[in-house]
Amino acid sequence: MTNEMTVTIGTPSDREVVLTRHFNAPIQMVFDALTKPELVRRWYGPPGAMDICESDTRVGGTWRYVTRLKNGKTVGQFGVYTEVVAPHRFVRTERWDDWDPGETLVTTVLVEHGGITTMTASMVFPSQEVRDVVLKGGLTQKGTDEFYARLDELLKES
């Protein structure tokens, strides 16, 4: 496998989206890059646009990301970790600052084989309508591939 990997986006049910992506890095590095604020800040969202990046990765701990778009608008997300089994799995809730259609439950599972870590992130939305809005908005193949390509670059540096 190479670092030229793409994400697979699936919709196994009317409320769910599942992202699957391989990373050419050990599981602990991928887990850290997904959960440690100083690392998340380096790859998440538009480059250099994270105004707030906080994450207390423990059961009951909270997380909050605020990114600034090119037009100056900010987009905030937040939630609570409900399960953490480092470096293999974490589950957290997700809500949005300016749009509150209800809580999304995101389960991220990491599995390593031969130095390649597979991430599977399952997002269960409050309704099919909310899932479809997210799929049409920001959760596109192109955007998600760009997102994780920046994570690949970070993992190469480590």
Image (cartoon, grey):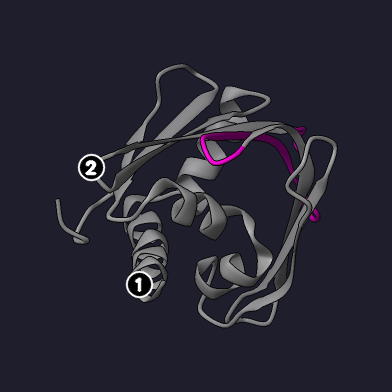
* Tag 1–tag 2 contact (CB < 8 Å): no
Q: Which residue is drawn at the image coordinates 34% and 64% (left, top)?
A: 152
Where does the image place residue 90, in percent across and percent down from the top left? 62, 35
Could you say which disc has been placed on residue 84 in the image?
A: none
- The quarter in which the C terminus is drawn is bottom left
Q: Which residue does the image show at 43% across and 31% down from the upper left? A: 18
Q: What's the magenta region?
A: 86-103
Quick check: 23 left or right of 54?
left
Residue 144 rendering spot, x and y as whole percentages: 39, 55
- Check residue 153 in the rendering and tell me which mark sits there, or answer none: 1
**Which label belongs to residue 114?**
2
Residue depicted at x 51% and y 35%: 88
Q: Disc 2 residue type? A: Gly
Seen from the viewer's position, the closer of residues 129 and 91 is 91
Distance between the alpha carbons at the discs numbered 1 and 2: 19 Å
Q: How many numbered marks are there?
A: 2
The crowding category of the residue bearing disc 1, from other C-alpha atoms within 10 Å (few below 14, some 14 to 19, many at least 20), is few
Between 36 and 50, the residue placed more toward the observer is 36
